[in-house]
Image (cartoon, coloured by chain):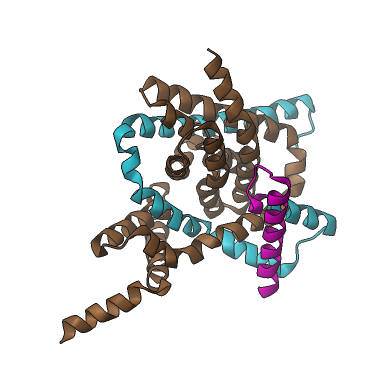
Chain colours: A brown, B cyan
Amino acid sequence: MITPRIADIWVYLSASPLLWLTITLIAYQGAYWIYARANFHPLLNPVPIAIVALVLALEATGTGYPAYFEGAQFVHFLLGPATVALAVPLYAQFDKLRRLLLPLGGALVAGSVTAIVSVLAIGWALGASDATLLSLAPKSVTAPIAMGITEKLGGIPSLTAVLVILTGISGAVMAKYVLDALRIRDFGVRGFAVGVAAHGIGTARAFQVSEEAGAFAGLGMGLNGLLTAVLVPVVVSLIRHF
Amino acid sequence: MLAAITTLLVYQLVGEVLVHFFALPVPGPVVGMFLLFLSLWAKGSIPDGLHTTANTILQHLSLLFVPAGVGVMVHFARVSGEVVPIVVAILASTALAIAAAALTMQGLIALRRRGAGKAPR
C-alpha cells in the first residue's frame, strides 16, 4: 500500500514549484558548506558543484528542465534585483574608483579585446566551426548581453548561454592562480580583472573574497558588457574582410 | 528590508522600461544599477537598510546562477561535437583576459604613481 502512496505524493510534489525550489536551495547550501569547509578553495566553487548535483537529481528522477525551472525560476528571478544591488558596493568604493579612472579604462579595453580576439584565434586554430566562433566571441559578458550580440551576428544564442556560464565558472576557478602567478595583490585590480573576464560568476567569487574586490568586479562586468556589445561586431566584420 | 527590496525592484522596473522604450542593447537591470548608482551619488550616502539588503543578496550571488547553469548542462549535448576547441579556447582566453586586464591596470597605476613623483597615495 505504501508504494502507490509515495507515487501519489511524488506526482503531487513534482507538479508544484516547491520541490525543485527547495532542492535547489539545499543543493547550493550543501555545495557552499563544502566550499566553506575547504576555506573557500577556488576549485570547490559552489556553482559547478550545485549544478552537477542538480543535473544528476533531474536525470535520476526523469525530470525535464521546464518542470525544474517552474521551481528554480524564483531563484533565477533574483538575478535582476541583485544586478541593481551592485550599485551599492560600487558607490561604497566610489572614492577609490574615481582616482583610478585611467587605469580602469585601460584595463577594461585590454581585457575586453584580449577576451574576444584570443577566444576567436584559439577556437579557429583548433578548428571550431564559424557558428561556434560567433557564439564564443562575447563569452566574457553577462548572458543577456552576450546572447543579444550572438543573435545579431547569426550565431547560436542558446550555445552562447552555455559558453558564457562555462567562462564564468572557469574564471571564478582560475582567477586566483593566474593573479597569484602574476603577483597582483591589490583587491581592486584582482576584482576588476575577474569581472571583465568572467562576468557575474567571477563577480560572485570576488564578493566571497572581499567586498572591495566584489565592487570592482561588478564594475568590470557592467563596463565590459557595454564595450563588448560594441567591439564584437567590429572585430567580426574586420575578420570577415580578410 | 522590505523598503530596500522594493527600491531594487523599482529601479529594475524603470531600467526595463527605459531599455524597451529606447531599444537599448543593454539588459534592464544594468540600466537599473546605473540609475541607483546615480541616485546614491546625488544623495551622498547609502541608506542602512539598502546597504544590509544589498550585501545579503550579493553574498549569495553564486546561488542565482545555479538555475541557468542547470539549463546549460542539460543542453550540453549541443557542444559535444566540438568539446576540445571550445573548452581549450574558453580556458585559455579567460586566463589571458584576466592577465591582460590585471597587468594593464597595475601597470597604469604604477606609471601614474611614478609620474606623480614622490607622493604615493
Residue A123 placement (x, y as % from top left): 41, 26
The residue under the point 26% across, 58% down is A59
Q: Which residues are magenta?
A: B1-30
The residue under the point 73% across, 37% down is A100
Magenta portion: prevailing SS class = helix
**Image height of A218 relative to A99, above or below:** below
**Image height of A132 relative to B4, above or below:** above
Number of numbered discs present?
0
The residue under the point 41% across, 30% down is B89
Looking at the image, residue A179 sits to the left or right of residue A226; the answer is left
In front of the other: B12 or A107: B12
Residue B118 placement (x, y as % from top left): 78, 29
Residue B105 visible in image: no
- Image quadrant containing the N terminus of chain A: bottom left
Looking at the image, residue A54 sits to the left or right of residue A135; the answer is left
* Magenta span includes B47: no
In front of the other: A95 or B113: A95
Residue A112 placement (x, y as % from top left): 59, 31
Residue A210 visible in image: yes
**Image height of A123 relative to A8, above or below:** above
* Residue farthest top in this picture: A242
**Image height of B35 relative to A115, above or below:** below
The residue under the point 71% across, 25% down is B111
* Residue farthest left in this picture: A1
